[in-house]
Amino acid sequence: MTPEQAREAAAVMLAFADGKKIECRIKTGLDPWVEVAGDPLWNFAYCEYRVAPEQWEGKILVHANGDIACMEGNEPLLNLPGWRLITVKEVIH
């Protein structure tokens, strides 16, 4: 294991210690990432590990005509007719 690989492994292990969800896959890269159930075995010779991507949450502005704007910097739109502030959450299949 190279020093860079050791840093990457340590970062994932620290994320696990902090309560983050961890995913793994066989090193060929052909298999999909799967969430690790329970404690990881940390078999870096055969598997690669990563912190599971988190779902995005945020607020967007939606107009009655279907237009969409991000919230950041567009607060004045809230005072115009037809705009609504919507809280959204990414859905991962």
Image: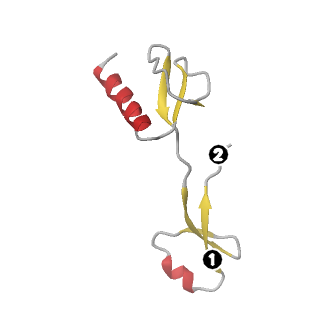
Specify the amino acid type for callout 2.
Ile
Residue plotted at (44% across, 35% down): 16
The tag earlier along the polypeptide, 2 or 1, is 1
Crowd around label 2: few <14 · some 14–19 · many ≥20 (10 Å): few
Circle 2 residue:
92
Specify the amino acid type for callout 1.
Arg
Direction from residue 66 to residue 42 in the image, left or right: left
Circle 1 residue:
84
Could you say which disc has been placed on residue 15 in the image? none
Residue plotted at (49% across, 75% down): 74
Vertical position of residue 26 compared to residue 15: above or below:
above
* Quadrant assignment, res 89: bottom right
Q: Under tag 2, what secondary structure?
A: loop
Vertical position of residue 72 compared to residue 33: above or below:
below
Place of residue 51 in the rendered image (x, y in percent of width and height, measured from the top left): 47, 36
Q: Nearer the viewer, residue 74 or 39?
A: 39
